[in-house]
Image (cartoon, helix red, strand yellow):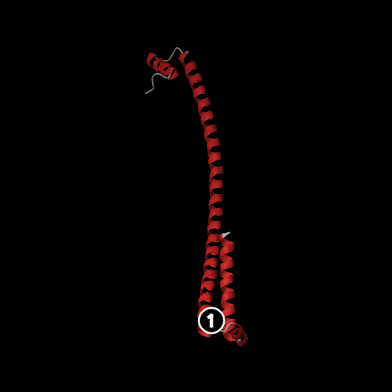
Amino acid sequence: MKKKLFNALTYTLLGVSLLSMAYVLVPEFQELVPDLGVPTAVIVAIGTFFMSGGYVLVSAFIKKEQNKFDNLSNILAEKFLEMANHYKELTKKLEENDRTNKELVKLEKIQLKTKLDNPLITKSAKELIEGVLDDKKKPL
């Protein structure tokens, strides 16, 4: 809506500028509206021309900046999606590592339980192994 209004205003001002210049340059127009006067028509033509030209420049600048912003937004969205995919991959790898670590802990506990049955292990070593298996004592 704003863009349409902006464009309508721009083209209206250009039209007024062209009509004012036609009034100055074509004597038949001066006869149709004798009360306007040439100096007034020149002032109106120059003023509206610069205003409409300014609107056209502002519109072009806004469009150019909007395109830059859209391009940057697209690049940012692509990078965000790329990071999200990397995050999912890393999360899967972390979950896999957690599962592997839990399996390794189970295997280590099984190994320690089998060492407890060994009659050659000292009493202090047995206590350390039992502490690890009970999760109460931490080994040195």
Quadrant containing the N terminus is bottom right
Q: What amino acid is found at the position of numbered circle 1 in the picture?
A: Ala
Q: Is residue 28 above or below residue 53?
A: below
Q: Is residue 25 above or below residue 1?
A: below
Quadrant containing the C terminus is top left
Residue drawn at the location 56% of the way across and 65% of the way down = 6
| Label 1: element kind | helix
In percent of width and height, residue 63 lies at 55, 63
- Give the number of marks: 1
Q: Is residue 101 above or below residue 69?
A: above
- In this view, the residue farthest toward the bottom is 27
Q: Nearer the viewer, residue 11 or 30?
A: 30
Q: Nearer the viewer, residue 11 or 125?
A: 11
Q: Nearer the viewer, residue 90 or 125?
A: 90
In percent of width and height, residue 59 lies at 54, 66
In percent of width and height, residue 5 lies at 57, 63
Residue drawn at the location 52% of the way across and 67% of the way down = 58
Q: Is residue 137 left or right of residue 23?
A: left
Q: Quadrant of residue 7?
A: bottom right
Q: Residues within 10 Å of mark 1 (few under 14, many from 20)?
A: many
In percent of width and height, residue 20 lies at 56, 80
Location of mark 1 (residue)? 41
- In this view, the residue farthest toward the front is 35
Residue drawn at the location 52% of the way across and 35% of the way down = 94
Q: Nearer the viewer, residue 12 or 124?
A: 12
Q: Is residue 140 left or right of residue 87?
A: left
Residue drawn at the location 54% of the way across and 60% of the way down = 66
